[in-house]
Amino acid sequence: MTDIAWIDVTLASARPKALGALLRYFRDLDIAEEAFQEACLRAIRTWPDKGPPRDPTAWLIFVGRNSGIDAVRKRSKTQALPDEELISDTSDAESDIAERLDDSNYRDDILRLLFICCHPDLPATQQIALALRIVSGLTVQQIARAFLVGESAMEQRITRAKARVAKAGVPFETPDAQERAERLSIVSTMIYLIFNEGYSQADPKHEACAFSDEAIRLARLLLRIFPGEPELMGLLALMLLQISRRQARFNGENDIVLLEDQDRSLWNRELINEALALLDKAIRHRQPGPYQLQAAIAALHSRAKRAEDTDWEEIELLYRALERIQPSPVITLNRAVAVSKLRGPEEALALVETLGEKLDRYFYYHGLRGGLLKQLGRAREAHEAFDRAIALAHSAAEAAHIRQQIDSLAHGAAQPIAK
């Protein structure tokens, strides 16, 4: 067996479980990561000739644990060894580890690993970078290119994040049901941040585009180990519905194509059907949450064969429900789009104007406000709002879209900007 492509796939798949277990053994992120890397190197050397072990994840944990213990013992020449129970146990059998993976330990290992990466002491950019490096195994070079920073700067960012996590003293005990739910919520937010980092890219060759697929992979992993969590179903359904429109969101010149102008034949119906099935399953739990509601809104768009078939009345009701359980000016801003479709730009603008103080530095606020002003024939105010939106744009595609709105000011009303 000389083709080693399958080894890369196997190692990437095993990484979260194996690294999470090694972190539980050593309670040190650097030692756990080094131990896993050593196990991977040994796998690359031995698996092509001998074939994969019966349980690759258990093999990686077993080899990594022994490698990590050796490394810790070497360091003991200059520093004291940790307590024995932190770096070893009474079993050396690989089969024992495989048995342990069948129990609930590995679920909490993965959750703990993800939770560490999205520790609240870390800014969002460091959370994403750390998760992509530690959990997903992306190289520093890959992450740096995606964030458009130098490799050394990204290395420093990840190193600082690790140091901050170590200083924070994240607990390693198995979380109880309430803490597990809290951690799942935080981890879900981090996964969605990763998704949006890739989803916002217009250039399909941009490194960050792969982040969306990685976020979906992580959500699938979490849902496999927590299959009864309706909010995880909602999160995965939401991302699948959004990514199903990937081919239609930008034209050949990488210009933004608004949802209502998209060629719906380009939407991926297979992903849409999977998402709708997930959402139906989540709703049956009768535990509505923010991701389920957002997925339900996206589902209404996906079910509409034409833009004019969109059920805006139901969408507004869903946004109202979302406002109740997760009040946010951004949610209210999105509801204003539905209001404009149902009752016109004047009522929508009145709602938008109440958000100015909170969303003054938000691109979509000024883009939507400019679009509504334009529909009302208030060209000068619309131009000012569009200028402000351009100054806050996150990408060339966003700025180009607003410039098109400015260029067409003399040609009558346009529709408000929408994600």
Image (cartoon, helix red, strand yellow):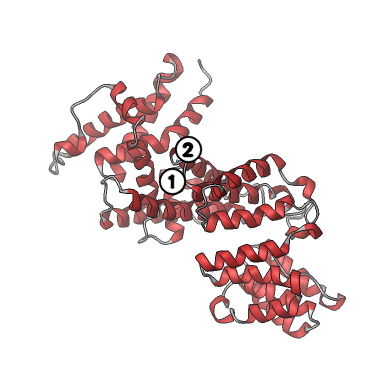
Pinpoint residue 116: horizontal percent, then vertical percent: 35, 51
Q: How many marks?
A: 2
Question: Left or right: 270 with respect to 66?
Answer: right
Find residue 320 and report its horizontal and vertical position in percent.
60, 68
Disc 2 vs disc 1: which is toward the camera? 2
Residue at disc 2, secondary structure: helix
Instruction: Name the spot of residue 409 as percent of width and height, x first.
Output: 81, 77
Q: Could you tell me how far apart the alpha carbons at marks 2 and 1 are, in whole angstroms?
A: 22 Å
Q: What amino acid type should be assigned to the residue bearing mark 2?
A: Arg
Q: Where the C terminus falls, by quadrant? A: bottom right
Tell me if I can see residue 394 in this picture: no
The crowding category of the residue bearing disc 1, from other C-alpha atoms within 10 Å (few below 14, some 14 to 19, many at least 20), is: some
Q: Position of residue 349 (x, y in %)?
A: 69, 79
Q: Would you say residue 161 is visible in this rendering? A: yes
- Is residue 70 left or right of 373 when viewed as pictured? left
Q: Up-down: is 58 above or below 145?
A: above
With respect to residue 210, does 287 lie above or below?
Answer: below
Looking at the image, which is closer to me, 327 or 414? 327
Q: Is residue 92 above or below residue 271?
A: above
Residue located at (34% from left, 25% from top): 98
At x 35%, y 34%, the residue is 36
Q: Amino acid at mark 1?
A: Arg
Horizontal side of 109 relative to 316 (left or right) equals left
Q: Earlier in the sequence, mark 2 or mark 1?
A: 1
Q: In the image, is residue 139 above or below residue 366?
A: above
In the picture, measured across the screen, residue 30 lies left or right of residue 255, that is left
Report the disc number at residue 316: none
The extreme right residue here reads 411
Looking at the rendering, which quadrant does residue 64 occupy? top left
User: Mark on residue 133?
Assistant: 1
Check disc 2 and report the residue beneath it. Answer: 224
